[in-house]
Image: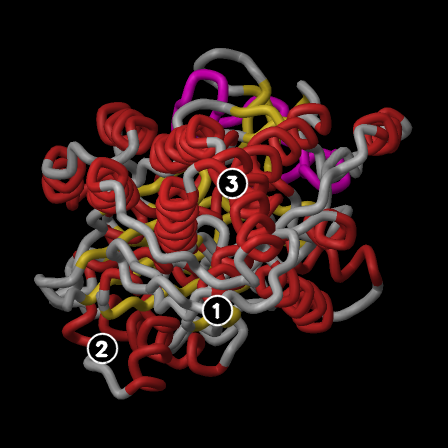
Amino acid sequence: MRNILIGGAWPYANGSLHIGHIAGLLPGDVLARYHRAVGDNVFFVSGSDCHGTPVVIRAKQEKRTPREVSDFYHEEFVECFNKLGFSYDVYTKTSAKEHIAFVKEFHKKLYESPYVYEKEAPQAYCESCKTFLADRFVLGKCPKCGNDARGDQCDVCGTVLEPEALAEPICAICKKSVSFKNTKHLYIAITKLKDELKALVDNHPQWRKNAITFTNRYIDDGLRDRALTRDLEWGIQVPKDGYEKKTIYIWAENVLGYLSASKTAAEKRGANFHELWGREAKHYYVHGKDNIPFHTIILPALLLANAGEWHLPDSIVSSEYMTLEGRKISTSRNYAIWVKDLLKNYEADSIRYYFLANGPEKKDADFSWREYVHSHNGELLGAYGNFVNRTLAFIEKYYDRTVPCGTENPQINQQIENLFASVGRQIENGVFKDALDEIFEFVRSANKFFDANQPWITRTTDKTACENTLYQCVQIIAGLAVLLSPFLPFSSEKVCKWFDLDNKWERPSVAAGYSVPQVEILFLRLDKKVIDIESEKLKSIL
């Protein structure tokens, strides 16, 4: 039994989740469900990112406190993740007392290391908003390529920036000019860790291509030391004399949530937290590509500088971007599909299937309502749901819901065995789309098997052949239920209950004579009118 840590990115608790968030985070739940089925000791953790400038700004806009705003969205996130079937062992928030206590102790030790020093440097301040600004909330022109850029990075040329280097700097919130005030802060000397960080990426060729490319670019362009503290009121107080009015910079505490949340999870089940972070464990980090440097540079730098025996990232599962009907998702213009609204009208497994089969795993992907409806009706319902329904409806009608006595097809059983090995291997390697495609290719072959053997004819002309066909189809359904359980947990749970199957990652078997309970249709057909209705909603926003 292996110790497996799966860390899902922590969404900012300053607004609702949209489809881009879900597309990037769903692979984490697939990993967790698969590793549990294999028998591993899984710690699947995440939480809401409650501190920092984005939450403070939202609170000012809504005339509420940052805690009120972040707690509100945290509860909304929890509800959405639950409805989507995310099987977190711990989903917490950065404002939780357990996280705050852990981060303070971690930073106390961090400040004793030779990698932390004190420096006075300019920090962006907005007179209009009356607040210091995080680097990403300063906008201006990139000094290298001249394009629009944020204070931490130019997305056009990829240059890592300091906000004071921008030409014509303005506040991202009010769009007014910012000034720079010198202030004293603690810094972590990431530049001194270049060799270790370079070795980390070089030793993990299995990382997603974008993670390797982005990380090498950050290293080759020249790493920069980063401030650990900030002049912000809403956050975790810096545990150091003389810094009582400052807080820990959000990037230096939110990634530590993987440690604090896994510690909470370990304590809940009486597991050894230090073993989870030891050499023999395996760690996955699941997020979008905009979060790559935080998981391949920032988190490892903090772990190395803390001088503990911390386990560095094994697998970086970093998705590309998700667009919407050919346009960039824009939360400020409300051009998005919000997860809370999506869940009101569509099945969770349907949503999961679309984003796992059509998501931004290897390249940017576009969500369209036309493709969503066709994917649901054509694959999920038309191929898988149809095979399950036609088989069980036939058994219900002609065999009184009793699995007939038949002979298994060795070739098909071997195909199922091979699928368990292949799909499992692909999941562990962070390849989800191809794994799901392979399962559905088998689903299509199962439908061809049913059609080719014509049980509706052999029922009267060759009873043995009919029973062999139906018996084998039941075994296929059982195998598919387990194979699809990491991807489609709700429909798989239904089928597993029908056949009294456990969730072990191996080919199951259903005995002849088993009495199948009253079954229901797995998926409802989506009316094609949905395409026009939902598309018009989006057009009205533009």
Look at the image and give the residue range highlighted in magenta: 152-180
Q: For marks 3 and 2, give the one nearer the viewer.
A: 3
Task: Describe the element under mark 2 as helix, strand or loop.
Answer: helix
Badge 1 vs badge 2, beta-carbon distance below 8 Å: no
Relative height, residue 302 to residue 217 (above, below): below
The tag earlier along the polypeptide, 1 or 3, is 3
Q: For marks 1 and 3, give the one nearer the viewer.
A: 3
**Few, some or many residues within 10 Å of mark 1 (<14, 14–19, 20+):** some
Residue 84 colored in magenta in the image? no
Q: For marks 1 and 2, give the one nearer the viewer.
A: 1
Q: CA distance from mark 1 to mark 3?
A: 22 Å
184, 137: nearer the viewer: 137
**Residue drawn 28% across the image and 25% down it:** 213
Q: Position of residue 199 (x, y in %)?
A: 10, 38
**Few, some or many residues within 10 Å of mark 2 (<14, 14–19, 20+):** some
Q: Position of residue 85 (x, y in %)?
A: 54, 60
Amino acid marked by disc 2: Phe
Residue 460, label in figure: 3
**Residue drawn 66% across the image and 38% down it:** 178
Residue 273, label in figure: 2
